[in-house]
Image: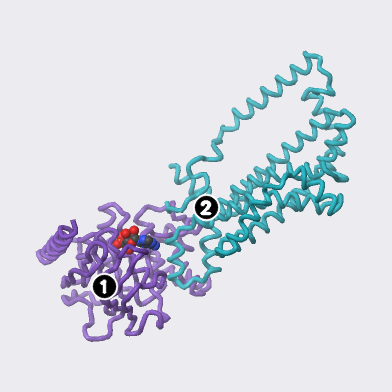
Chain colours: A purple, B cyan
């Protein structure tokens, strides 16, 4: 990444999107959850799915990871159907899902271990990143000995080291207090460009969506549909001060109005 | 902390703090003192109620016989218990992994626990003789169940997010057991082990009572016949000490095998 801020979002228009959902429907028994969701993620892009709690955001991720089969619709990875693709995504679940019996170092290498990387190689790959993630002094700690922010960073590092071209982050900072969340958002913005992955991020925090994204999809309450797609043309890397800039505030207000309107319609 | 259920998360089975053993010891000491005073003052025959001092004296004098028989009982218990653990692990994995086996096997397993020991112990002795085998079988039969049930409950307590995470990483079924379900079940396993271990010794002794050439059970029977109540009590005392020792050993094993569990509970209580 260059130190020169770029005004254009990292989206590379024209090429085949990394990921594409077309009219995806899903229901759990009789409960309709997804009602024709269409969205796409270009290579190198960070796209947010913003929607109220329980609208079906996590369900989109279960479909992408293959743990849930959609009732209808198409999911394309690099233009090929999901089922035909052997590509896996690095997922950070809504709960951090750290294993309490593994120390931090063994938690963050879990994905590599599953891929068949030896323990020594896995540790070697993780070690240079420990400092960036502020975990270098806690590698021998158990997850329950960590603060909420550190747990989230450990879960994120476990996701990043899997070295997949797409990362799916499900409300990565949802469980944190407001101050820690702001810290983590600023921190993620400062480092994520170096990972070189496309990111699909779920949140119900409007400010988080604007601060981190190139584009935002707004979902309706359940059953979820995409009600708006908003581009965030703010220069990167973004800093905490940008939250007060007029462009930031305008987009934030726009999203707030969209959400208020759909909530009103569903009330 | 993760949302996974854990045994004893609400009721701590070990309420003993650093000096928690003081009241327990005081009550035992008071009971023994009362018993001693009563046995001395009331003039009751030692064949009916020997004093604690007499029990210890007689036990010490008969220490060789007690030791030999204790070793025999311990051997039966240990082998039976080992079989029970292996059986419980195998069965619980089969049942957990397969819905059909769950419905097929559970009634049988529950049924096995309704067999009255008084009825089957003599039969198993008749079938397998007076040696080690019938005791091992009986101990295993009666102690595999609590371990199996504990393990099954443990697997179910696995955090579904962890399992989905492993699947998203490409983990197969065996990997998910190894990395998530089995470790989650370990604290439950040890809880089950503690229930089973107390059964085991009682069952071993009862099985000996039904027919054996050595062991604390047969020793108790023989000494009862010759009215050596003091030696019967001595054997009971040894049994109690043995049970407490094995019970404590499960905690030691737990601390060695799943050190994280103790630490996590300490952190939780902060
Ligand atoms: N496995 C499931 N079985 C039945 N209902 C489910 C399941 N998973 C989620 N749901 C329901 O589907 C809806 C959407 O869930 P989810 O995708 O987790 O929402 P979100 O992540 O947006 O909060 C919720 O009402 C939830 O209760
Ligand atoms: Mg969710």
Q: Residue furthest right?
A: B226
Q: Which of the four quarters of the rendered structure image does ligand 1 lie in?
A: bottom left
Q: Which mark is residue A36?
A: 1
Which x, y percent locates residue B262?
A: 53, 47
Which x, y percent locates residue B100?
A: 57, 64
Which x, y percent locates residue B214?
A: 86, 44
- Displayed quadrant of residue B203: top right
Along the line of sight, which residue is nearer the eye, A138 or A16?
Answer: A16
Chain where mark 2 sits: B
Is residue A220 visible in this depiction of the protein? yes
- Displayed quadrant of residue A52: bottom left
The residue that label 2 is drawn on is B260
Q: Residue at x 49, y 71 (%)?
A: B171
Instruction: Please tell me whether mark 1 sits on a helix, a strand or a loop.
Output: strand
Which quadrant: the C terminus of chain B?
top left
Q: Is mark 1 within 8 Å of ligand 1?
A: no
């Amino acid at each position: 990444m260059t130190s020169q801020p770029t005004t254009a979002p990292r989206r590379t228009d024209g090429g085949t999107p990394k990921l594409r959902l077309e009219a995806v429907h899903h229901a759990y028994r009789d409960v309709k959850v997804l009602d024709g969701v269409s969205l796409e993620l270009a290579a190198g892009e960070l796209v947010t799915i913003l929607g109220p709690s329980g609208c079906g955001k996590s369900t989109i991720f279960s479909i992408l990871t293959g743990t849930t089969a959609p009732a209808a619709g198409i999911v394309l990875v690099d233009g090929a159907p999901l089922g035909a693709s052997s590509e896996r995504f690095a997922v950070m679940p809504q709960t951090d899902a750290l294993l309490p019996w593994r120390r931090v170092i063994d938690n963050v290498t879990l994905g590599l271990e599953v891929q068949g990387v030896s323990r020594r190689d896995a540790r070697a790959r993780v070690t240079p990143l420990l400092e960036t993630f502020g975990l270098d002094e806690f590698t021998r700690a158990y997850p329950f000995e960590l603060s909420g922010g550190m747990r989230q960073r450990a879960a994120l590092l476990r996701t990043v080291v899997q070295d997949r071209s797409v990362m799916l982050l499900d409300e990565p900072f949802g469980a944190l207090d407001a101050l820690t969340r702001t810290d983590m958002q600023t921190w993620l913005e400062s480092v994520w460009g170096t990972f070189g992955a496309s990111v699909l991020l779920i949140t119900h925090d409007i400010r988080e969506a604007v601060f981190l994204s190139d584009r935002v999809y707004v979902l309706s309450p359940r059953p979820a549909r995409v009600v708006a797609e908003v581009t965030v043309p703010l220069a990167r890397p973004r800093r905490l001060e940008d939250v007060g800039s007029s462009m930031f505030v305008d987009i934030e207000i726009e999203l707030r109005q969209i959400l208020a309107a759909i909530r009103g319609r569903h009330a | 902390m993760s949302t996974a259920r854990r045994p004893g998360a609400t009721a701590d089975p070990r309420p003993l703090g650093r000096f928690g053993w003081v009241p327990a010891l005081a009550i035992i000491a008071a009971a023994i003192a009362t018993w001693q005073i009563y046995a001395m003052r009331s003039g009751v025959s030692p064949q009916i109620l020997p004093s604690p001092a007499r029990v210890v004296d007689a036990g010490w004098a008969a220490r060789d016989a007690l030791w030999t028989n204790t070793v025999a009982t311990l051997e039966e218990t240990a082998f039976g218990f080992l079989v029970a653990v292996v059986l419980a692990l195998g069965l619980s994995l089969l049942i957990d992994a397969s819905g059909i086996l769950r419905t097929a096997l559970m009634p049988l397993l529950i049924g096995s626990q309704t067999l009255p020991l008084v009825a089957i112990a003599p039969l198993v002795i008749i079938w397998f003789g007076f040696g080690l085998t019938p005791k091992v079988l009986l101990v295993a039969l009666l102690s595999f169940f609590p371990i199996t049930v504990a393990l099954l409950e443990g697997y179910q307590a696995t955090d579904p997010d962890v399992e989905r995470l492993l699947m998203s990483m490409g983990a197969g079924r065996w990997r998910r057991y190894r990395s998530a379900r089995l470790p989650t079940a370990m604290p439950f396993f040890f809880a089950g082990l503690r229930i089973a271990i107390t059964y085991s010794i009682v069952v071993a002794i009862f099985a000996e009572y039904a027919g054996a050439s050595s062991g604390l059970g047969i020793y108790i029977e023989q000494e009862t016949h010759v009215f050596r109540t003091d030696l019967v009590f001595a054997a009971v005392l040894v049994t109690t000490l043995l049970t407490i020792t094995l019970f404590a050993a499960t905690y030691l094993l737990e601390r060695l095998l799943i050190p994280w569990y103790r630490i996590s509970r300490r952190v939780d209580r902060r």
